[in-house]
Image (cartoon, coloured by chain):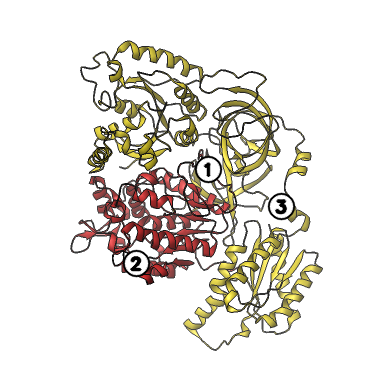
Amino acid sequence: MIPKTNQTPLQHTDELTDAVRALTPLSRYSPRDQMPDYSHLDALEAQSIFILREAFHKFKNMAMLWSIGKDSSVMLWLVRKAFFGHVPFPLVHVDTKYKIDQMIQFRDEIVKQWGMDLRVGTNQAALDANTTFPQGTATRVECCSMLKKDALQDVISKYNFEAVLAGIRRDEEGTRAKERYFSPRTKDFEWNFRDQPPELWDQFKTDFEPGTHLRIHPLLHWTEANIWEYIDRERIPVVPLYFADEKNRRYRSLGCAPCTVPMFSKADTVPAIIEELAATKVAERSSRAQDQESEDAFEKLRASGYM
Amino acid sequence: MSQNPLNIVIVGHVDHGKSTLVGRLFYETGSLPEGKYEAIQATCQRRGVPFEWAFLMDAFQAERDQNITIDTAQIWFNTAKRPYVIIDAPGHKEFIKNMVTGAANANAALLLIAANEGVQEQSRRHGYLLSLLGIRQVAVVVNKMDMVDYDQATFEAIEAEYRQFLKNINIEPQVFIPISAREGDAIASKPTENMPWYQGPTIVEALDEFNQPSQPIDQPLRFPIQDIYRFDDRRILAGRIESGTLNVGDVLHFTPVNKSSVVKSIERWSAPNQDSAVAGESIGVTLEDQIFVERGHVGAHASTPSTPSNRLRANLFWLGNEPIKAGNNYKIKLGAQEMPVTIEEVVRVIDASTLDNHEESQKLVQKNDAAELVLRTPKPLALDLHQDFPITGRFVLVDGYDVAGGGIITEILDGTNIKEEAESQQPVSPIERYKRNRHRGVILVSQGLLPERSHPLMVQLERALFNRGMQTYLLQPAHSDLQDAEQDMRALALSARSLAAAGVVCLVNAPWLIGPKLRQFRQIADDAHTGFVVVHTGRFDFALAEEGERAEQRDDFYFGDADLIVLQQTTDIHERVTAIVEQLVPHLQRY
């Protein structure tokens, strides 16, 4: 019998196709014989897999948000862990058209090699009207609202997704720290953070009024360091922009080109990044200019439907 | 090298200083991100208020305005010994459900009491909730010692009162610590001349004394089935081992269905092959025999199975707006099991803030109360006592759309009238349909012929299956013009999904569903309990002239999704139908 999909289950990451491996060569990771003890990641991985399987069981028409960044790339890996090599739902990429070129190249290569169903959401109207930051009149946050939040809502409505998986983490910033694994949104995509469902003992809110839409956050309990440790252990391909270039610049957090700046760094391997993070006191999203516009800018953006 | 943080919840009455304690802990252990101290300072100046540590955790605008913690938040910090996650839980009575959410994920708790106010309603309620939530590692922190002039007698009076209360609910606190979060006494460094009488541990020392809980590897095995996957030719039971150890070759016994089979393999993706798995691992299992098990059934070794019953006694805390009374109906979620449940009896209601029994006549469990209840389900569940199996011995109740309470099983009672109630209240399950029809619901899509040519073939195929006693239906989509293609596809997929769910072999004559379109169709139409079969009816309808790579690409495009390929050199429809039926029937009869 021929497999139902063209996604062949892999036995081991070293069997990644050459094309995917070339995106992040093995020299970026700890050598197998010098791999640090990453056994603390087992519990995080098992919890994420548990959540992904709950989500898949409860929501037939579900999609995964893939920002091409390190977190959602780890999530994609965990999806394949959970479903034994398969990605049994579509991926959604909200493309603002301001993404850095290497991100789009990376996306297209992975999609091609792993045979995934990618749906791209773009707010073309806003781009055509030329109101976006920095050319137009919009502030950074307003631009995020149009190109990311609105585009996401459009793509969710278009395909009628009941639920989307998003790779946010509690340690990223304050409002995300208060998130639930299964986080309901109204039909207008609003997040009522003042009245969130209780979540205990791995029992999630899975019963809803019709029209409710769900965000599911399988990586909520991971930290930035955990993400890199897991990338190292599993040898997960990531966008090369995360590694220091010859001018000693690397991106710690990836977003749109006008609002994301690289940091000074010599870390050009995954273990070097992990070491750098252990020493830093700078917040991960400090390089994302839209967060800094006003005290509660990000909170308002999230309450109205941002990821 | 790295280790996972210990999860600490900080609970206590509103305004007893939880968020301030957290801010101070971060500051004194050097865990504040760069610029954060200055940012809080700036915020406070802008608002014209004195410096307020609580702004660190209370990131929400509403909380900054009202100066109370609404939701539970989590942040990370380190001591020299290990990393911690601090779960800040709101003290307001309105937000008990958020406090429960925070505390349920904790490994240990700091219970905070303000020295100037003493033991309050929420101090007691939170203590009791910690006990029900199964948190046994507790340190009591008496805050705001600066407001009582660091008076030793005040501290000791609070300790005596609260220690007695905790004793009643089986919590043995590790230590009582007098502190001032605002002034920084006894947080990370020993108290200054303010409290020369206190020689005990600081907050940081007390935290470092807590133990990291370990997975219950040595307990009897519990493997609840979370889902069953048939992504390829394997039938994988997916789930997380909640306790014990599972080995290839073990006989797995499932409750409440009373079926057994031998573990053939333990499945993981991109991980070293191992023939055993232990508590905490999310894995997959294949069995030697195709037995009827489904989501919710709990696998165990035959000598130590879960107990099947439809009645249980439980201690429960209630967060719902509508009170519980005997006869009310809810949904119980216990592991992956979900079932309607009836409150058979409210044995007693406990006011969680005083531990007093409510009046006998009252028997109403109000919001934020705790109670002892007897619950009854229409069919047996796989049950464990909470004292033996903390994870599989607890459940939540869903009222309408909302998780409204949590409980622990204290006694498994004899079941009653299980069969009768099962048949009257339970929806007909896919397995019941399977047993009656002697085949499962399947969606069958044909490929390889133009619609007008495939139509007669599908008609004959349906006839052949129907004559073999199968439930069949031929779904004939309207011709779609390009504009409505997607909508038509969706409508078609939803119809097919319903028919298959009803147990029917649904034949879909839509050979234009190929490649990505077919996968999209499948995503909407396919269901865990039904099958999906793509029958390729023969490649000779396409030009076969190309060779090599192009032919491969073409094959992938046309055949990549097929489960069943019937390749023949004949154009005789009858022969083709016979060949398809022969290959198809065993596929349909397997569950």
Q: Which residue is mark 1?
A: B241
Q: Which residue occupies the foreground of this view, B209 or A242? A: A242
From what the image shows, is residue B317 above or below residue A163?
above
Chain shown red: that is A
Q: Are marks 3 and 2 in contact (CB under 8 Å)?
A: no
**Quarter of the image containing the C terminus of chain B?**
bottom right
Mark 3 lies on a secondary structure that is helix
Quarter of the view holding residue B562? bottom right
Q: Which residue is mark 2?
A: A131
Chain containing mark 3: B
| Chain B drawing hue | yellow
Looking at numbered disc 1 in the image, what kind of residue is underneath it?
Ile
**Quarter of the image containing the N terminus of chain B?**
top left
- Viewed as shown, does residue B147 lie left or right of B472? left
- Viewed as shown, does residue B283 lie left or right of B372? left
Chain containing mark 2: A
From what the image shows, is residue B455 above or below residue B329?
below
Q: Which residue occupies the foreground of this view, A61 or A89? A: A61
The residue under the point 74% across, 80% down is B456
Mark 1 nearby-residue class (10 Å; few <14, some 14–19, many ≥20): many
